[in-house]
Amino acid sequence: MSITQQHLLDAYRAQHLGEPAPPAPGAHDWQVVREWRDRRDFHAVLAGRPAHGRLRQSLGRWLHPGRRATS
């Protein structure tokens, strides 16, 4: 059963039970991504690591091994 078919079945059941219809698949994907990113940044700060720019810093160290990062 595909995601669309499951959603239609859930919406049909909700309608017959008098409940609100479930959100469409993918309706909250970006919100989940933002919450995951916020949680990752929060845990980085708790661990004493910078919350932003970690990828850029590590790429800079890899591309320019003799240069030190300024932070």
Image (cartoon, grey):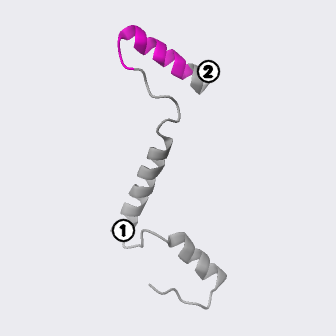
* 8 magenta-colored: yes
For label 2, the residue is 1
Q: Is residue 24 above or below residue 38?
A: above
Q: Name the residue under label 1.
A: 45
The magenta stretch spans residue 15: yes
Determine the main secondary structure of the stretch shown in magenta. helix
Quadrant of residue 61 in the image? Answer: bottom right
**Which residue is found at the position 43% from the left and 24% from the top?**
22
Quadrant in which the C terminus is drawn: bottom left
Q: In this view, does 37 lie above or below 70?
A: above
Disc 2 residue crowd, few under 14, some 14–19, many 20+, Cα 10 Å = few
**Which kind of residue does numbered mark 1 sit on?**
Val
> In the displayed image of the protein, which residue is found farthest to the bottom?
66
Q: Image quarter for residue 67?
A: bottom right
Kind of residue at disc 2: Met
Residue drawn at (36%, 73%), measured in percent from left and top? 48
Magenta segment: 6-20
Give the percent coordinates (x, y) of residue 5: 58, 20
- Look at the numbered disc 1 and give the secondary structure of its residue: helix
Q: How crowded is mark 1: few (under 14 residues within 10 Å), some or many (20 or more)?
A: few
Which mark sits nearer the N-terminus, 1 or 2?
A: 2
**Quadrant housing the N terminus:** top right
Q: Is residue 61 left or right of residue 22?
A: right
Vertical position of residue 54 compared to residue 33: above or below: below
Q: Where is residue 51 in the image (x, y as percent from the top left)?
A: 42, 68
Answer with left or right where residue 4 lies relative to residue 70: right
Q: For numbered disc 2, what is the local secondary structure?
A: loop
Which of the two residues, 10 or 30, is positioned nearer the viewer here? 30
Residue at the right extreme? 63
Q: Where is residue 6 in the image (x, y as percent from the top left)?
A: 54, 21
Viewed as shown, does residue 51 lie left or right of 66? left
- The structure residue drawn at horizontal position 52% and vertical position 31%, both measured from the top left corner, is 25
